[in-house]
Image: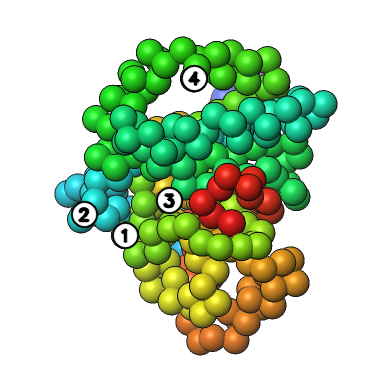
Amino acid sequence: MAARVLGNIVAAARRAAARAQGRALAAAAAKSSTAAITTRALSATSYNSREDSWFKSLFVRKVDPRKDAHSNLLSKKETSSLYKIQFHNVKPECLEAYNKLCIEVLPKVHKDENYRCELVGTWNTWYGEQDQAVHLWKYSGGYPTLTEVMSKLRQNKEFMEFRKERGQMLLSRKNQLLLEFSFWNEPVPRSGPNIYELRSYQLRPGTMIEWGNNWARAIRYRQENNEAVGGFFSQIGELYTVHHLWAYKDLQSRDETRNSAWQKPGWDECVYYTVPLIQRMDSRIMIPLKISPLQ
């Protein structure tokens, strides 16, 4: 009897030990499996990260370090001219009176030798932003000339009255200070009649040099019909903005001239390499006022 009881105890102990060993093995296996899954997940994440990084590298431009500001690298060295472009959104019912006021006052500033500035062109938009006036001014001598002219105009009672009266006709206004691309034509007076297209590009920050390098080669494809008027990039105001100003006899001439560029080897490369640099773009077709040097 005692022997049988002792045997049962030993057998129970062995079964308990076996169950404990089984649980330990199961726990170890689960732990090993979890570790393997984690390792595979980390490995997959690392791989996906490398894959994603490699994929993005195909599209993200690497910007080389520069030793000088793009304004010094892209603008004309022989002149220190500064340009100001103004966009005035006029109350629709006031556009005619606004134009009349500008025709009376702006030529006086343009012709007065006390003000070292030139009216390059003045327009109303035809297609694009409606009831908008665009003025382009040139300040030979750069920022010092701009400061001098603005200071003198503030002392001019007629001009200050003009600004006050003009302000009552406007919904909004903005301006930018621009430099001229070295490889573009300098805007000079031309006879008309012409329509003008102002194409404005908002570039991705850091891409101005790349834009300039491509257009320095491409501009020759757009000179055949004397359509290139001027090319500018912003310094103050909305930055990384480029403005290209073109002249055409009419909309049909514009269409034919632009289409003919695609027949010239090399133009497609300019488009291919510059389109990815653009965040947004805009086109205005403009009609010059009768006082505009660009007709």
Element at label 1: loop
In this view, 208 is above or below 220: above
| Count of picture labels | 4
Residue 40 visible in the shown view: no
From the image, tell me which residue sits under label 1: 182
Q: Secondary structure at mark 4?
A: helix
First along the sequence among labels 3 and 1: 1
Q: Identify the residue under disc 4.
A: 159
Between marks 2 and 1, how big is the CA–CA gap? 8 Å
State yes or no: discs 3 and 1 in contact (Cβ < 8 Å).
no
Instruction: Say which amino acid is labelled 4.
Output: Phe
Which residue: 34% across, 20% down? Answer: 152
Q: Residues within 10 Å of mark 1 (few under 14, many from 20)?
A: some
For label 3, the crowd category at 10 Å Cα-Cα, with few meaning under 14, some 14 to 19 and many 20 or more, is: many
Mark 1 vs mark 4: which is more N-terminal?
A: 4
How much space separates mark 3 and mark 1, taking CA atoms?
Answer: 9 Å
Residue 124 rendering spot, x and y as whole percentages:
68, 43
Q: Residue 61, how many percent across, how many down? A: 41, 57
- CA gap between label 1 and label 4 equals 33 Å
Q: Residues within 10 Å of mark 2 (few under 14, many from 20)?
A: few
Which residue is located at x 36 percent, y 37 percent?
A: 117
Q: Amino acid at mark 2?
A: Lys
Residue 82, placed above or below residue 281: above
Q: Which residue is mark 3?
A: 232
Residue 293 percent location from the top left of the image: 51, 51
Residue annotated with mark 2? 77
What is the C-alpha distance between the residues marked 3 and 4? 27 Å
